[in-house]
């Protein structure tokens, strides 16, 4: 039970930062970064750098977005560059937030170049090193989460969770090689965990499509999962870029 307590506590971080910037195709960039009086062309510099990493950049003004993005704003990650200048150095903080205003990635960049335009752009170049090439997960129609915060009550000895699944009628699943337990965090999120591990085998987050979920695997890969005939199915990424259907049957 204590291991499960540790697992639930650690998963808070997984949920908050479950997505990577590379999971997205679209990046929204404001017309002007608010912490700069003069941003020295950083907006265009960021846009060009992200295009080089295979992202599609769009305006920070949602009224200019294509209809399909307006109706599915969670498929867009929002970029910002924050002025973090000190007396001696030009510094910036590159930040990406999802549709629920949660930070997906924050990266700092600094430079010894004292000229503002060249210096800020060099600092942003350093911050961009942490941004991976776009490798978007399969697009699903999802909406911003309810503003109310979901809570999981954890003590040192007792974890209150609802393991049984109304969709499958089971709380334990196996593909014949791995035995997993389903741990329901709230109405929209659950885990599949191994009994001897403090890291979730898979973290499921609901989409607006019934019984279809965004899935974060223990190795960091993102994919989709769904309920099918009382089983849980995960589309497992393969080394050749394809996906294999992995079926976990309920016990």
Image (cartoon, rainbow, N blue to C red):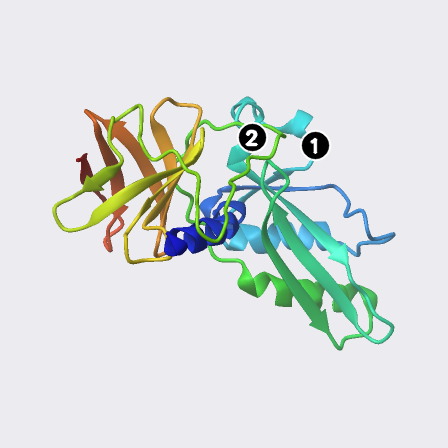
Residue underneath mark 2 = 145
Residue 204 in view of the camera? yes
The percent position of residue 161, horizontal first and vertical second, equals 41, 37
Numbered circles on residues, count: 2
**Viewer-side label of 1, 2:** 2
Q: Tell me the crowding category of disc 1: few under 14, some 14 to 19, or many 20 or more residues within 10 angstroms, Cα based.
A: few
In this view, the residue in front, 104 or 91, is 104
Q: CA distance from mark 1 to mark 2?
A: 21 Å
Residue 81 vs 246, above or below: the answer is: below
- Find the residue positioned furthest to the front: 157
Screen quadrant of the C terminus:
top left
The percent position of residue 171, horizontal first and vertical second, equals 27, 35
In terms of secondary structure, where does tag 1 sit?
Answer: loop
- Numbered circle sitting on residue 61: 1
Residue 154 vs 91, above or below: the answer is: above
The quarter of the displayed image where residue 164 is located:
top left
Counting residues from the N terminus, which is met first, the one under dot 1 or under dot 2?
A: 1
Q: Residue at x 40, y 55 (%)?
A: 2
Q: Residue at x 77, y 75 (%)?
A: 113
| Left or right: 249 as drawn, with respect to 129 | left
In terms of secondary structure, where does tag 2 sit?
Answer: loop
The percent position of residue 154, horizontal first and vertical second, equals 50, 46
Residue 54 in view of the camera? no
| Left or right: 245 as drawn, with respect to 216 | left
| Left or right: 114 as drawn, with respect to 69 | right
The quarter of the displayed image where residue 189 is located:
top left
The percent position of residue 89, horizontal first and vertical second, equals 80, 73
Q: Tell me the crowding category of disc 2: few under 14, some 14 to 19, or many 20 or more residues within 10 angstroms, Cα based.
A: few
Q: Residue at x 77, y 48 (%)?
A: 33
- Find the residue positioned furthest to the left: 176
Q: Residue at x 16, y 44 (%)?
A: 175
């Amino acid at each position: 039970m204590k291991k499960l307590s540790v697992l639930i506590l650690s998963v808070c971080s997984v949920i908050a930062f479950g997505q990577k910037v590379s999971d997205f195709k679209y990046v929204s960039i404001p017309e002007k970064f608010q912490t700069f009086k003069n941003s020295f062309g950083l907006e265009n510099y960021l846009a060009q750098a992200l295009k080089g990493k295979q992202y599609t950049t769009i305006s920070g003004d949602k009224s200019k977005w294509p209809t399909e993005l307006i109706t599915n704003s969670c498929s867009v990650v929002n970029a910002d560059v924050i002025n973090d200048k000190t007396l001696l150095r030009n510094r910036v903080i590159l930040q990406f937030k999802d549709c629920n205003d949660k930070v997906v990635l924050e990266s700092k960049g600094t430079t010894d170049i004292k000229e503002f335009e060249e210096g800020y752009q060099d600092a942003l170049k350093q911050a961009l090193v942490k941004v991976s090439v776009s490798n978007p997960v399969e697009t699903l129609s999802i909406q911003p989460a309810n503003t109310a915060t979901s809570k999981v009550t954890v003590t040192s000895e007792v974890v209150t969770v609802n393991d049984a699944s109304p969709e499958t009628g089971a709380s334990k699943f196996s593909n014949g090689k791995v035995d997993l337990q389903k741990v329901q965090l709230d109405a929209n999120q659950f885990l599949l965990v191994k009994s001897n591990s403090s890291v979730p085998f898979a973290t499921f987050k609901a989409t607006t499509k019934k019984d279809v979920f965004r899935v974060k695997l223990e190795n960091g890969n993102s994919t989709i999962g769904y309920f099918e005939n009382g089983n849980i199915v995960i589309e497992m990424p393969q080394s050749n870029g394809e996906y294999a259907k992995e079926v976990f049957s309920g016990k």
